[in-house]
Amino acid sequence: SEEIVVDGVNLSSWCKTQRLHRKKKCAGYSVERKKLLDEIGFVWDPFNAKWHAKYKVLVRYHQVEGHVSPEAKSVFEGVKIGSWCVVQQVLVRKKKMSPVRKRLLDKIGFDWRPE
């Protein structure tokens, strides 16, 4: 991941530490600290947030194109939506996708057949 440094503070590392402390319920981690971070929209699960952001792009693709079967090399709104869809198909075949994500994709008529 990319390092982000502001005023000499490595924010990437700091954010990772906040997530880890919350997950492990480390000493010194307070409800107040979590509340302050929540108030500014801190992302506790960046991987999940990234998936949902790409899912939202796919939803807009569906609205514009009328289908959810982009070609593998398709780019939409700057996102390689075609290759993202291929990854989703592979995850389902390998039974590595959460039921929640699969339901979301099913809801918009996702094409599970590989190209």
Image (cartoon, rainbow, N blue to C red):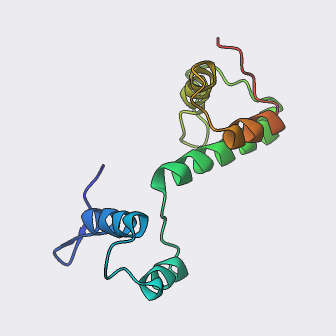
Q: Position of residue 89 (x, y in %)?
A: 63, 22
The one of 66 and 97 positioned closer to us in this rendering: 97
Report whether 83 appears left or right of 89: left
Q: Quadrant of residue 82?
A: top right
Residue 108 visible, this angle: no
Q: Quadrant of residue 84?
A: top right
Report whether 46 appears left or right of 88: left
* Quadrant containing the C terminus in the rendered view: top right
Q: Position of residue 33 (x, y in %)?
A: 42, 84
Q: Quadrant of residue 14?
A: bottom left
The one of 8 and 89 positioned closer to us in this rendering: 89
Residue at 49%, 57% (x, y): give it. Answer: 45
Residue furthest top as drawn: 115
Residue 6 visible, this angle: yes
Residue at 71%, 35% (x, y): give it. Answer: 102
> In this picture, is 69 found above or below 27?
above
The one of 64 and 99 positioned closer to us in this rendering: 99
The one of 52 and 7 positioned closer to us in this rendering: 52
Count of numbered tags: 0
Report whether 113 appears left or right of 79: right
Residue at 60%, 25% (x, y): give it. Answer: 95
> In this picture, is 67 found above or below 16?
above
Residue at 35%, 63% (x, y): give it. Answer: 20
Q: Position of residue 78 (x, y in %)?
A: 54, 41
Q: Position of residue 32 (x, y in %)?
A: 46, 88
Residue furthest left as drawn: 8
